[in-house]
Image: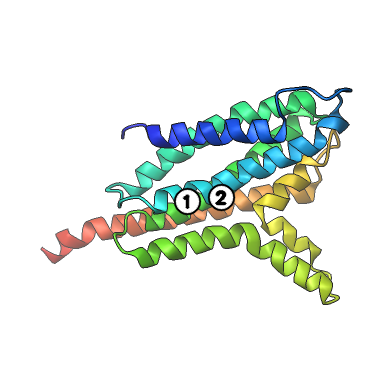
Amino acid sequence: MVLPRALIFLGSLWLIGSWFLAIGIRPPVQPSAASYEPGVRLMLLCVTTGLMIGWPLLRLSQVPSPAPLRQTMLDLAVLLAMVQVVLWLLRLVTTWSPLRTAAIDAALAGWAILAGAVIAGAVGSPRSGPRHLAMIVCLAMCLLAPALAVVGVMGGVDSITLIELSPLLAVRSLGDGGGAPLTMHQWRWIGLLFLAGAAAWLALGLFQWIQSRRPSRDA
């Protein structure tokens, strides 16, 4: 497979633009973790939005891929490698411990793997229907849980825990923890996220294997 140069270029522009928007090029008058906190939150929001909405929108608007699973895996490897550069630099202006930074990294990777499974399942189709549905699923993964949580709270229902089902707020929640150790509940969510991603990719691989064997059986 050829490296996705256009994705690398656009992803780099997205990260550079996000850095300038969130962090800027001038340090605060009194540099501290507290003064950088709003910028770090915005940076995490930008990175997550790029992975969960920007990348699917780009791929699902292009011509069908002849090898959707391999192409999406390559995209994932490239994007997650780019995220490492930004994420671990953010640790220099926060109180995150290495373990918390790794947890944020793992959460981003887990959600990206899930989004990748959705993309891989539709990007090989020449029809617009599966592509539109895949984009709706990616948007729902980001926005549906926070919307339901807000509606539930307004209706007097304790539904605030639903925000953990959204990558935008789950990553922000991890980032707001500072130097405190992670709870078992947070680690459990990250583990479940990877299990869901692995199951989705396993199902896709199994479906592709069945499809590839069907002509030989018919012959």
The residue closer to the viewer here, 63 or 119, is 63
Q: Residue at x 76, y 36 (%)?
A: 39
Q: Is 188 on the left-hand or right-hand side of 6? A: right
Q: Decide which of 29, 86 is in the foreground and name it.
A: 29
Instruction: State the mark number for residue 183.
Output: none
Q: Is residue 67 left or right of residue 219?
A: right
As measured in the structure, the alpha-carbon distance from the residue carrying label 2 to the one carrying label 1 is 7 Å
Q: Is residue 81 above or below residue 114?
A: above
Residue at point 49%, 46% (across, down): 55
Question: In front: 213, or 121?
Answer: 121
| Residue 40: image location, x then y, percent | 75, 36
Q: At 64% from the left edge and 60% from the top edge, which residue is drawn? A: 143
> For the C terminus, which image quadrant?
bottom left
Q: Residues within 10 Å of mark 1 (few under 14, many from 20)?
A: many
The answer to whether marks 2 and 1 mark residues whose Cβ atoms lie closer than 8 Å is: yes
Look at the image and tell me whether residue 117 can be seen: yes
Residue 56 shows which numbered tag?
Answer: 1
Q: Tell me which amino acid carries mark 2.
A: Met
Indicate the quadrant containing the N terminus: top left, top right, bottom left or bottom right. top left
Q: Position of residue 29 (x, y in %)?
A: 87, 22
The colour scheme of the drawn protein is rainbow
Q: Is residue 11 above or below residue 133?
A: above
* Label 2 residue SS: helix
Query: Which residue is depicted at the point 63% across and 29% down?
Result: 86
Q: Report the residue that reaches farthest toward the bottom.
A: 155
What kind of element bears circle 1? helix
Q: Residues within 10 Å of mark 2 (few under 14, many from 20)?
A: many
User: Which residue is identified by label 2?
Assistant: 52
Residue type of the residue flagged with mark 1:
Pro
What is the x, y in percent for residue 19? Answer: 65, 31
